[in-house]
């Protein structure tokens, strides 16, 4: 992936790409540019969920006892946020044709696992080179490519 795109991920999600995540510094991102938007969308999904949980809990502290913010609703908001963190990505790479995403284990939310799984699976449908709809191909080596980048029936002309 181009450095410009990596830097965009680092700048947009500094908490998920801390420069202390491993001995090499920031997460290693080793895949084609075509998957940039999958990784971006995964990070947005995780960040939005985290922000929502945090905001709901903070609001519950302010309005506790009001008509909507009953004891039970406030307890639920606290439970949904307590112990929740953002993942720190360690390594994002292509392996056997699709994305593999490794994060540290302190985020404690099945939602994050789901977002990561979705991104990994989505990569099997998107050309790693250009981002167009693609197919997982397995002759010689595994990769996902589109008909433009890798025609299955090359034009005889
Ligand atoms: Zn392509």
Image (cartoon, rainbow, N blue to C red):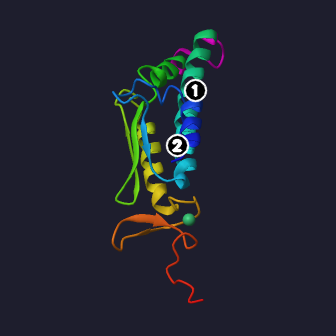
Residue at image x 42%, y 48%?
117
Question: Is 14 above or below relative to 27?
Answer: above
User: Would you place residue 44 above or below residue 59 in this image?
Assistant: below
Quadrant assignment for ligand 1: bottom right
Q: Residue 78's spot in the image, x, y percent? A: 49, 18
Q: Residues within 10 Å of mark 2 (few under 14, many from 20)?
A: some
Q: Which mark is residue 93?
A: none
Horizontally, residue 95 falls left or right of residue 114, namely left
Q: Is residue 121 magenta?
A: no
Q: Is residue 154 above or below residue 147?
A: below
**In the image, which disc is placed on residue 51?**
1
Tell me if the residue at label 1 has its CB under 8 Å from ligand 1: no
In the image, residue 31 above or below residue 18: below
Image position of 132 (left or right of 142): right
Q: Nearer the viewer, residue 132 or 81?
A: 132
Dominant SS type (magenta): loop
- In the rendered structure, the answer to whether residue 96 lies left or right of residue 53 reads left
**Mark 2: which secondary structure?**
helix
Q: Quadrant of the C terminus?
A: bottom right
Residue at image coords 49%, 80%: 152
Name of the residue lying farthest toward the bottom: 156
Can residue 16 be seen in this snapshot?
yes
Q: Which residues are magenta?
A: 63-73
Q: Secondary structure at mark 1?
A: helix
Image coords of residue 142 (percent x, y): 37, 65
Residue carrying label 2: 42
Q: CA distance from mark 1 to mark 2?
A: 14 Å
Say few, some or many: other residues with alpha carbon within 10 Å of mark 1 (under 14 / 14 to 19 / 20 or more): some
In front: label 1 or label 2: 2
Residue drawn at x 46%, y 64% as measured from the top left: 144
Nearer the N terminus, badge 1 or badge 2?
2
Q: Quadrant of residue 101?
A: top left
């Amino acid at each position: 992936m181009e450095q410009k795109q990596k830097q965009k991920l680092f700048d947009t999600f500094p908490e998920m790409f801390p420069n202390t995540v491993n001995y090499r510094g920031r997460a290693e991102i080793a895949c084609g540019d075509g998957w940039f938007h999958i990784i971006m969308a995964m990070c947005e999904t995780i960040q939005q969920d985290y922000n929502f949980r945090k905001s709901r809990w903070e609001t519950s502290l302010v309005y506790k006892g009001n008509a909507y913010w009953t004891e039970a609703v406030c307890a639920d908001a606290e439970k949904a946020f307590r112990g929740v963190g953002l993942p720190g990505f360690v390594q994002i790479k292509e392996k056997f044709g699709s994305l593999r995403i490794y994060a540290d284990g302190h985020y404690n939310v099945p939602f994050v696992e789901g977002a990561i799984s979705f991104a990994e699976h989505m990569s099997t449908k998107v050309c790693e080179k250009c981002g167009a709809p693609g197919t997982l191909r397995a002759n010689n080596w595994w990769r996902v490519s589109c008909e433009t980048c890798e025609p299955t029936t090359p034009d005889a002309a």
